[in-house]
Image (tube, grey):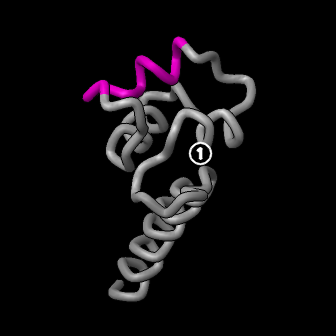
Amino acid sequence: MRLVGITITCAVLAGAVWAQTMVEDADGDGVYSMEEMRAAYPDVSDDVLVQIDVNEDGAIDEDELAAAIAVGVLES
C-alpha cells in the first residue's frame, strides 16, 4: 500500500514539474513575461493572457499559471 502512495505522489509531482516547464523563464526572473507566454502558447490571445495575470503586474507567476491550467484556460 505504501508503494501505491509513493507512486501516486511521484506522478502528481512529475505532472506539476512538466506543467511548469511548458513555459521557459528565459530571463530567470521567476515569472513569465507575456513574450515568454506567447512563445509557449502561440494560439492564446493577448486578452486571455491579461486575464490570467490576476495581480495585474504584467507577468504570469507560477500560481497564476497553475490556476489557468487547473481551470482549463491553458493546456499543461
Task: Give the residue drawn at x 62%, y 36%.
Answer: 35
Name the residue furthest bottom: 3
Residue annotated with mark 1: 76
Q: Quadrant of residue 21?
A: bottom right
Looking at the magenta stretch, what is its main secondary structure?
Answer: helix
Q: Is residue 1 above or below residue 62?
A: below
Please state the horizontal and vertical placement of residue 10, each as a whole percent of the image.
46, 76
Q: Closer to the camera, 57 or 41?
A: 57
Task: Give the residue drawn at x 49%, y 46%.
Answer: 32
Q: Is residue 16 above or below residue 37?
A: below
Q: Closer to the camera, 34 or 13?
A: 34
Q: Is residue 50 magenta?
A: yes
Q: Is residue 44 magenta?
A: no
Q: Is residue 59 above or below residue 26?
A: above
Please state the horizontal and vertical placement of residue 12, each as a whole percent of the image.
45, 64
Q: Quadrant of the N terminus?
A: bottom left
Res 75 visible: no
Looking at the rendered structure, the kind of residue marked 1 is: Ser
Task: Give the residue drawn at x 59%, y 45%.
Answer: 76
Q: Which residues are magenta?
A: 47-56
Res 21 visible: yes
Task: Give the residue drawn at x 74%, y 30%.
Answer: 42
Q: Closer to the camera, 64 or 3?
A: 64
Under tag 1, what secondary structure? loop
Q: Quadrant of residue 59?
A: top left
